Image: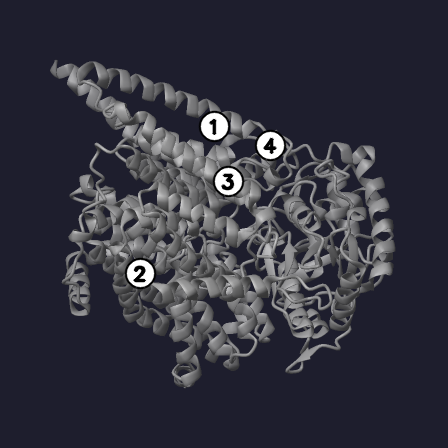
Amino acid sequence: MISRFSFGWSFVFLSLFIGCERQEDFPNRPITLVCPWSPGGGTDQVSRQMAYFLEVELGTPCTVINATGGQGVTGHRRGMMARADGYTVAVITFELNTLHHQGLTTLTYEDMIPLISVNEDAAAIWVPVDSPWQTLDDLVADIKANPGSLTASGTATGGAWHLAFAGWLQSAELETSAVKWIPKGGADPSIQELMSGGIDLVCCSLPEAKQYYDRGELRALGVMAEETVPGFEDIKTMREQNFDWVLVGWRGFAVPPGTPADRVEVLRRAMQKIVSGEVEVDGDSFPKFMEQRGFNNRWRSSDDFHEFLARNDGALGKLLNSEAFASLAEGAVGPYDFPMILGVLLSGLVIAQVIVLRRTKSTSTATETPELISSSQNLTASSINVMFGLGMILVYILLAETVGFLILTALLLVLFLWRLGTKLTSSVVITVVLVPLVYYLFAVILRVPLPRGWWGV
Amino acid sequence: MELQNALMDVLSLETLLTILLCGLFGLFVGSIPGLTATMAVALIVPVTFYLSDISAIAAIVTLTAVCIFSGDIPTTLLRIPGTPSSAAYVDDAYALRQKGRYADALSTSLMFSVTGGLFGTLILFLCAPQLAVLARQFGTYEYFWLYALGLSCAAIVSGDSRLKGAIALLIGILFSLVGLSEVHSEPRFTFGSEELMSGVHFIPALIGLFGVSEVLRGLWASGDQNAVSPESDLSNLQQSDFSFAQQISHWLSRMVRRPLQTLRSCSLGTVIGMIPGAGADIAAWMSYTFSKRASSTPEEYGHGSEDGLADASAANNSSLAGAWIPALVLGIPGDSVTAILIGVLMMKNITPGPDIFTQPEQVRLIYGIYLSFIVANLFLIPLGYLGIRASGLILKVPQRVLLPIILLFCIVGSYAISSSLFDVALMLFFGLLGFILERYRYPLGPVVLGLLLGADLEASFVQNLTKDRSLAAFFSRPLAAVLGVICLLLWFIPVIRAVVRKNSTVQEE
């Protein structure tokens, strides 16, 4: 028993010691990159490549977590509101400059310290290779002839490529409602819908459609870049076709405001080395990866990036706040229509259930009622127990980021074990063995970032 | 010739070792609730840079196959579904465990997972290009009916009352609508919280509904000294006579007894798996529903039916191979694992697409993929057996010690998804919800599926109406019409039957 005890404690002390923050040698703990988009997508791929080379350059584990949903609100927010110690890096994308104009978040590019931008990809308008439209003028003529009958997609309503497309419509002096926008979860499902014949055209970035383009299944009518894009030489820009419209999606990295300047500098330097190809592993480098996947390699250092962000945000703000865009977000089906249908259905079913219950009650005596009643004398003891459980977990949630994983989890475990009837001494032993083990397993082996507190663990 | 080369690739020491290590890793990750195959694959990606092409792919294949089986371990032993697809048969698996037959339950699910996996591979091998064309037919109308079909299946087969199943399903769907959806740029039911914009994260909800509610039930029972805890004498009920030979013979006899049912489940799984966006979860639920419908003993389903367990396991594993069909042939990821896979392939200078079947160098690789599917599935048999034996140890731990440990893993698992305590809070909320629903005997499975697919159902509904405001358009395409009619039949047959029965009883009176 004693040996197990000392083993457990040495584990705790060891982890406490390892976890201690020492100002002088940043980074000495795993770094987390918060990606606002889902695994497998373009931003995720770029983030994971960056994490991979960052790990090589800084010599500390770098993990990507995907905080997805809310059209990017959640991930951006989580990255930018994280503890400002340099150990959490936010992956930021184009949407950072649109979401706040749409009133979906209060965060703007000014709420963070930009590190670097690594990629700028222009949007393009794609059609199947057998489409009758050869040029944008053909398309414009068709839209004018049949307003409101063509359908397009590429992303959610109000998403980046929807804005890109609507902006192009405006530049062609067409109503933004002249083509119906079918909201889809991303470029991949949109292209699939295009292939299945469900829609007429797709607006998305060049690399997202690259494989279909390479295979000769899709053709682009025009690209919204400043100039012709390498690798896509046969696609004319909008300007070349007399539409004054440019829209480029970008990806970059940032840290929360208040991050110590020296740490920001360490990250900046490492990332600049990576994007300029100075960090190589077996002949592979970050720029090589970008080129391979068809991602545009253009990068900006932090000052340049900051300036670019300001310009980009201003331009998008002007666009999004213009009158034509105000009605853009309104789809054919209101946001509460579907929940309403379900609500009506649900209340119908609940009423039916009540009727059924009444009927069975009158025929047989209360077989449907839960066991709640059978043991009513112990109701209070049981519900106190459940309340205790709920309360403890709630306290845990509230305090975890302050106190830290190890201490609070140990406390929670001991209390639960004791409450369920385990002796206090054995509870302590189990806890002392188990909690450091779980910490080691998740934080070290599986690289799951766990809540950090007073002692960094 | 290419096949021979590919065989050499797969049977090399490096690849076999990769498969073995990934198998062990997958067994471990999959059996922790909250840790998913996607996460395991994402973790392995940096390692694949150092591996040969075929080993890299074998690693991903093995992880997905093993993870989906090992998800059944907590499903059976702790009643916490390791994957959403295990939610289809969680009641059956747990009922068997309570009868002391956990090893039977797990070995059934293991052997039929392998069967499903091998069958899916065979289909992948024989007619991937042809089937991929079918996958390409899926537009928003087809998706709407497919989701509706999958969801209705869950409501119909779960629990003892269809009404309660439907109520549980609607609760699940309603929760899935929280947040900023992909079709509306307006946050719904978020009460001003930016955290809730991303909606209810699925994994914490799953862990809460099953795991935390179990812990709460334990707390409730321990406050009730008079009540005899049903779990207290479980340790005596353990199977001690479970051997490897038995596992195989058990499987063989079942295969001989129900070859057609197994075939049906496997084909259903493969076909659903290859439709991007639909996956193991819909496959498992639909297979379970058909299995129950066709069974001579439908009353056993939900109370420890090994047939249901076998059919659903076969379907969810065969759907994994199915998901590779559009990924390889069209470059369309069927799920997040294949999305990562496509990334890895491109890193290795392989572009998925129709050409992959014509260029000799690529053909060798394709054969390599098929063969690694087969090898990985065969490895799964002894690995799974070890897993089953080892997991039996959990049953030796008394409930009062086990429950707090479950809670510990629930918390860490929920947190692990995106490093957010908000997800832990969601877990707690759904734990309470699950606890309450359980007490009133509402099935939890439909809530899970509703949460998982509800938002997709709404998205396709809105997309359809945006294209054309008439309901007739829902049947405008042939495939959509077929799916729609099947779905409507599924809804209205019970109603019609009930009406007919009522009429006949009225006449008798």
Q: Which residue is tagged 3?
A: B426
Please state the chain letter of the residue tagged with numbered disc 2 in the rendered image.
B
Q: Where B462 falls versus A354 (above or below)? A: below
Front one among A368 and B256: A368
* For discs 2 and 3, the disc positioned in front in the rendered view: 3
Q: Residues within 10 Å of mark 4 (few under 14, many from 20)?
A: some
Q: Which residue is tagged 2?
A: B113
Q: Which mark is residue B462?
A: none
Q: Which mark is residue A342?
A: 1
Q: Could you tell me how far apart the alpha carbons at marks 4 and 1 are, in whole angstroms?
A: 14 Å
**First of labels 4, 2 by sequence position:** 2
Q: Could you tell me how far apart the alpha carbons at marks 3 and 1 are, in whole angstroms?
A: 22 Å
User: Which residue is depicted at the point 52% across and 73% down?
Assistant: B356
Q: Check disc 1 and report its element: helix, strand or loop.
A: helix
**First of labels 2, 3 by sequence position:** 2
Q: Quadrant of the C terminus of chain A?
A: bottom right
Q: Where A184 falls versus A443 (above or below)? A: above
Amino acid marked by disc 1? Leu
Amino acid marked by disc 4? Arg
The tally of labels here is 4
Q: Could you tell me how far apart the alpha carbons at marks 3 and 4 are, in whole angstroms?
A: 17 Å
What colour scheme does the image use?
one colour
Please state the chain letter of the residue tagged with numbered disc 1 in the rendered image.
A
Amino acid marked by disc 2? Ser
